Image (cartoon, helix red, strand yellow):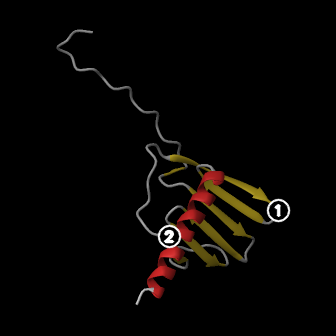
Amino acid sequence: MPADRPQERPQSPPAPPNAVAERRLAVQVGVLFGVDVRPTRVFVWLGRRRPGDEAILPLGGAPALPRRPLAEKTTHIGPLEVTYAGSPAVTVPFSAGRAVRQALRARRARRTP
């Protein structure tokens, strides 16, 4: 390659059509309720999910977004509809750890006069 030509970067493959920017695990339990667990917040709703009807429980901090969008996948297990992006085996423990740390911080803040 000649020295006067800048090195070209290889182009990233296009994101899948159902790609999302944040890892998540969402479970809809029939028409009863649902929960969407993300590393920095949890969404909970009654009935079918409608935008704006969710309760949002913050777990602190801004989301750490992956370099590439994650493919979102959906599976049905009996009355459950499970949707996830990224590995649920990583998402759930990571989110649980953040929730525990936040609860401990809140507890310490209540104890401190």
Vertically, is 44 above or below 23? below
Q: Residue at x 50, y 70 (%)?
A: 59
Q: Mark 2, residues whose alpha carbon is within 10 Å: few (<14), some, or many (≥20)?
A: many
Residue 14 image offset from top left, x and y in percent = 46, 37
Give the side of residue 9 with respect to residue 35, left or right: left
Residue 34 image offset from top left, x and y in percent = 66, 72
In which quadrant will I find the N terminus? top left
Residue most toward the right? Answer: 78
Vertically, is 38 above or below 14? below
* Residue 58 visible within the image: no
- The residue pinned by badge 1 equals 78
Q: Which mark is residue 18?
A: none
Give the residue type that dot 2 points to: Leu
- The residue pinned by badge 2 equals 59
Vertically, is 47 above or below 21? below
Q: Nearer the viewer, residue 113 or 8?
A: 113
